[in-house]
Amino acid sequence: MALTMLNGLLVNDLSPPMLLHQISKTAQLDTLNYQSSFMQGVFAHFPEILFIHRTYNPRGKVLYTFLVDGPQVQLEGHLARAVYFAIPAKEDAAGLAQMFQVFKKFNPAWERVCTILVDPHFVSLPTLAMEFPTAEVLLSAFHICKFLQGKFYQLSLERPVERVLLTSLQSTMCSATAGNLRKLYTLMSNCIPPAKLPELHSHWLLNDRIWLAHRWRSRAESSRYFQSLEVTTRILSQFFGTTPSAKQGMASLFRYMQQNSGDKGSFHLGLSPQNNLAPSDISPEIPKVEQLVESRIQHSLNAICTAPAAQLCLGELAVVQKSTHLIGSGSEKMNIQILEDIHKVQPQPPASCSCYFNRAFHLPCRHILAMLSARHQVLQPDMLPAQWTADCATSLDSILGSKWNETLDKHLAVTHLTEEVGRLLQHCSKEEFERRYSTLRELADSWIGPYEQVQL
């Protein structure tokens, strides 16, 4: 069933024939290998350096995207350098060996691959070395940059230190000379707590073989290179990385490729286009979809939440609408990054987040709303406690109507403590209730005032 649906999307490919190899006993997409004749031609012309990027979806399926790389590759357009898509049945040695073997079967030029660039978390290096015995496997500059960038954010360093590290990282990646790499290495050694420094694998910066594969680019070419890959990986994450169903994720990705098939027109053997893409060049249809989704989220907030809760959440949604948000997903949790603020989101209802807003109010925060927006979903009633739904009254309405200040913060803490004490008193034996109530009575009388003035 999954194969039939994907074939229906690909019949309009402008350059058939294509390869589509899929094994499935159900409607779910178990394995997929896809390459159009255009992609096959690009790889045949630029086979020397192969760049492999992995994109995980929320259910743990992984999309392998093969891209061509190197000095001779001058291609315009999003995904123009992509030459192969594959979803292995399992990300183990057998599954990856089968994926590579299918790729080699339909691409005789694989024997000319000299270098393969991978990310730091690539787990099957022996399988890759076995299937491409004459190729050298190296970490890619792009993936090292993204790895270090994420680590700098996760360490929760002081803002000035974080800013210096990020600026130095960006400058070094665009001019990866031995001197600049050594300076970044020294800066990290001085700024990162010693206990955390091993997590950053700073020794990669001193491995000159890694950077020789990237150093041939000028500063301007490096900047455009990173921007291009940032856009490409963002598109892959948007369509596959935020969709639980691998089938739906690939359908969305193929549909996007069809709608932007004009990218192929910029590829001509021997022609080097002068213009290069930037992150703002993403198809205008994507913002339209995002605006529609965010409008639906806004409507669901107004329909489901009480007025004060909706007002709070709409303020969080406004931050999402004005911010760049990145999502890295795993099987159970998602990493949400908005501007320079990173938190852990638990997507399963009721959705929760590690940020203060969600812990204090138990309402969908900007990080949860960013997740909904990326998944093209809306707020559901089971995503918030009953007291915040529109058909339930809440004792906090008057509090939320006021401005946020220190007194309000204390008031909320007292309110939550009072509710918790009340819950504990209701769910204990009669003897335990009398003992707890007596203790609470003594505390109130001695701390606040005599019995006549204190009502429990």
Image (cartoon, grey):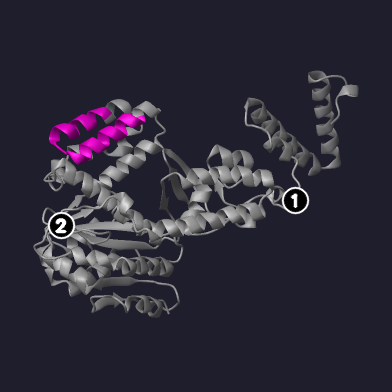
What range of the chain is rendered magenta?
162-187
Magenta region, main secondary structure: helix
- Which of 241/448 is in front? 241
- Which of 5/76 is in front? 76
Residue 120 inside the magenta-drawn segment: no
Tell me where residue 313 sits by quadrant.
top right
- Spatial CA distance of label 2 from label 1 is 61 Å
User: Helix, strand or loop at disc 2?
Assistant: loop
Mark 2 vs 1, N-terminal side: 2
Q: Is residue 72 left or right of residue 381?
A: left
Q: Is residue 101 above or below residue 201?
A: below
Could you tell me residue 220's position as x and y percent? 18, 43
Q: Is residue 272 left or right of residue 402?
A: left
| Picture disc at residue 316 | none
Task: Identify the residue under disc 2.
Answer: 273
Could you tell me residue 200's position as x and y percent? 30, 38
**Viewport quadrant of the C terminus:** top right
Residue 172 inside the magenta-drawn segment: yes
User: Helix, strand or loop at disc 1?
Assistant: loop
**Viewport quadrant of the N terminus:** bottom left
Task: Identify the residue under disc 1.
Answer: 392
Q: Is residue 49 above or below residue 163?
A: below
Tell me which amino acid carries mark 1.
Cys
Residue at image position (53%, 53%) is 347
Q: Is residue 366 left or right of residue 280?
A: right
Mark yes or no: residue 332 visible: no
Q: Is residue 36 above or below residue 191?
A: below
The mark closer to the camera, 2 or 1, is 2
Could you tell me residue 109's position as x and y percent? 12, 68
Residue at image position (13%, 58%) is 135
Could you tell me residue 280's position as x and y percent? 33, 50
